[in-house]
Image (cartoon, rainbow, N blue to C red):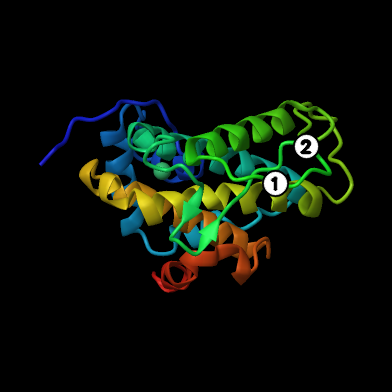
Amino acid sequence: SQQQTTDFNYTPSHQKPFIQPTTGTTVTTHQDIKQIVEVTLGSKGVLNQAVKLPKGENVNEWLAVHVVDFYNQINMLYGTITEFCSPVTCPRMIATNEYEYLWSFQRGQAPISVSAPKYVECLMKWCQEQFDDEAVFPSRKDGVFPARFCDKVVIPILRRLFRVYAHIYCHHFNEILELNLQTVLNTSFRHFILFAQEFNLLRDADYGPLLELVSELKDRE
Ligand SMILES: [Zn+2]
């Protein structure tokens, strides 16, 4: 039962090493992604290995590449459900009725309640600004990462990107099922939590409403 939905260009970078040598697959549609994801899900421990710092790799570089990768994955996933997530359907950025995430527009001012699409828009813009800042995410080979890059940059970004997964899981999972993207979502989220676990980036409290799902996905082969 192949379903035609939105086409998007997306190359899951962490999967490249496992795909290119054998098939040379080019990802052009989400159908390709699904096939690729199914292939990679078949191989035991691929994601568990994929998150580990390769020998000789600079840890900040490794963290930075993954932060950008997760940002792209989440952007792509949220992009598939934007028509279902409006200020009318989701006037507050919540995950279940127990968690609401507020946005702070100005330093020193109290964060305020905004709609889910507004929150995601602000979040993505805030991430993009940091990626574009050469002093935060150096793109040049001789660029230097800022002091405490992990604590000051990586963790705050991942903590917030997680909330988009939380909102999708808690309020748009039926739409994800209709689009048949649950495998893509689960794989992306599992990669995210395994990465966070490998480098001790998020605490249990950061997982809020998804803590149970997180434990389940971590344990799965
Ligand atoms: Zn929504």
Secondary structure beneath label 2: loop
Callout 1 environment at 10 Å: few (<14), some (14 to 19), or many (20+)? few
Between disc 2 and disc 1, whose residue precedes? 2
Q: Give the residue type at disc 1.
A: Pro
Secondary structure beneath label 1: loop
* Residue 202, image x, y percentages: 65, 63
**Tag on residue 106?**
2
Callout 2 environment at 10 Å: few (<14), some (14 to 19), or many (20+)? few
* Residue 124, image x, y percentages: 59, 34
Q: Give the residue type at disc 2.
A: Gln
Are dots 2 and 1 in contact, CB under 8 Å? no
- Residue 129 at least partly seen: yes
* Residue 53, image x, y percentages: 66, 55
**Tag on residue 111?**
1
Q: Quadrant of ligand 1?
A: top left
**Tag on residue 122?**
none
Dividing the picture into quadrants, the one containing residue 159 is bottom right
Rendered residue at 47%/69% (across/down) = 218
